[in-house]
Amino acid sequence: MRISELIDILQDKPKDADVEIAFVTPVDDDANEIVVNHFEVAAIFSPSEDSVLLISGDDDDVDELVDALEAGNELDND
């Protein structure tokens, strides 16, 4: 998603509205079920001019991740 698309979606929302991220994952590859987990956006980090990370999780974990990112550590995608 492009920032301009996100801005277009959010610009008509109330300024005090909550922003959450919903992750949809299959329960089982063979089952016709899904699980939807909702998480509040706890931090935003911009690793470069053309990307933005919306970060969610336990407050201590979020703080640790943001500190590591600000120190120049890269994310391990494995």
Image (spheres, helix red, strand yellow):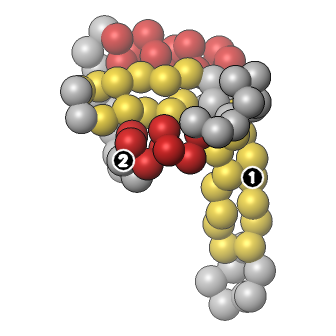
- Marks 2 and 1 sit apart, C-alpha to C-alpha, by 23 Å
Residue 37: give its label.
Answer: 1
- Which amino acid type is shown beneath numbered disc 1? Asn
First-in-chain label (2 vs 1): 2
Residue lying at 34% horizontally and 11% vertically, measured from the top left:
70
Residue lying at 29% horizontally and 20% vertically, measured from the top left:
73
What residue is disc 2 on?
A: 2
Q: Secondary structure under badge 1?
A: strand
Q: Is residue 44 above or below residue 20?
A: above
| Mark 2, other Cα within 10 Å: few <14 / some 14–19 / many ≥20 | few
Is 35 positioned to the left or the right of 52 in the image? right
Q: Nearer the viewer, mark 2 or mark 1?
A: 2
| Mark 1, other Cα within 10 Å: few <14 / some 14–19 / many ≥20 | few
Using the rendered image of the protein, determine whether residue 58 is visible from the camera's viewpoint.
no
Which of 55 and 18 lies nearest the eye of the viewer? 18
Residue 69: give its label.
Answer: none
The quarter holding residue 24 reads bottom right
Q: Where is residue 22 drawn, in percent x and y?
A: 67, 52
- Which amino acid type is shown beneath numbered disc 2? Arg
